[in-house]
Amino acid sequence: MKTIIFRYDPISPYAHLAFETWPRVMEGVPHRVRHVPVLLAGLLGHHGQRGPAEIPPKRDWTYRQVAWRAREAGVPLDMPPSHPFNPLALLRLATACSLHPAAQGGTSRYVTELLFHHVWHGGADPNDPDRLAALRERLATHMAECGHGMPSPDSPEVKQALRERTDAALAAGVFGVPSFELDGRQFWGQDALPMLRACLEGDPWFDGGAWESAARVGAGVSRSA
């Protein structure tokens, strides 16, 4: 059974939509998923990109589109009071839950769901101190019930692990979230899920040279910095 690496940052509404629609899109296709938290800002900074919410017209479109997609998919999605926000507290909580050996560097579906729901259900401030404290306690209790300790999210160990996983994503060619890695191939965005499913099912397109040839198109005009 093949493993898909689902790299996410809870700041992304598209990552939330991908997570929620995943079971429906991938139904009937055997696979495993490893949910790996990474810092989207680190990916964008490395590639010299701006996030969608940093470009005013694109920001408006992004929020309208995710609201539409959520409605069409029947997925709850409530915007927080302000966006983007600093997701480090949530990413460090996620990373702290993924450091035990059995986790293989990822968060369980249960933990990942708690993180996404914390941000995208109810429209509350993700960084509200009381809400963060309640989430931390719930995660610590869950990890203890599973027989695993949870290091402090503010520990050097956790901070280093998050940096390393973001660096590993960059080394693998990841430039945004949600991203999905299957057999060394990277798929980006919620709308890539049907393409990912086709690859997982063994669609011959992926082994017929089309994947490689698409990346050999010559670069044309390049804008100066």
Image (tube, rainbow, N blue to C red):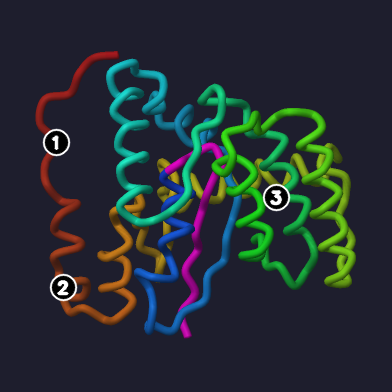
Q: Name the residue rendered at 89%, 61% in the picture.
A: 149
Residue 48 makes an appearance in the image:
no
144 relative position to 178: left or right: right
- Decide: few, some or many residues near mark 2? Use Cα within 10 Å; few <14, some 14-19, many ≥20: few
208 relative position to 139: left or right: left
Single out the mark in the foreground, 2 or 1: 2
Q: Where 205 falls versus 113 (above or below)?
A: below
How far apart, in angstroms, are the residues tagged by discs 2 and 1? 24 Å
Which quadrant is the C terminus positioned in? top left
- Decide: few, some or many residues near mark 1? Use Cα within 10 Å; few <14, some 14-19, many ≥20: few
Q: Which mark is residue 219?
A: 1
Write down the region rendered in magenta: 1-13
Callout 3, which amino acid?
Ala
Magenta region includes residue 10:
yes
The percent coordinates of residue 54 (x first, y second) are 41, 19
Q: SS class of the residue under badge 3? A: helix
The percent coordinates of residue 66 (x first, y second) are 36, 40
Q: Quadrant of residue 100?
A: bottom right
Q: Which mark is residue 205?
A: 2
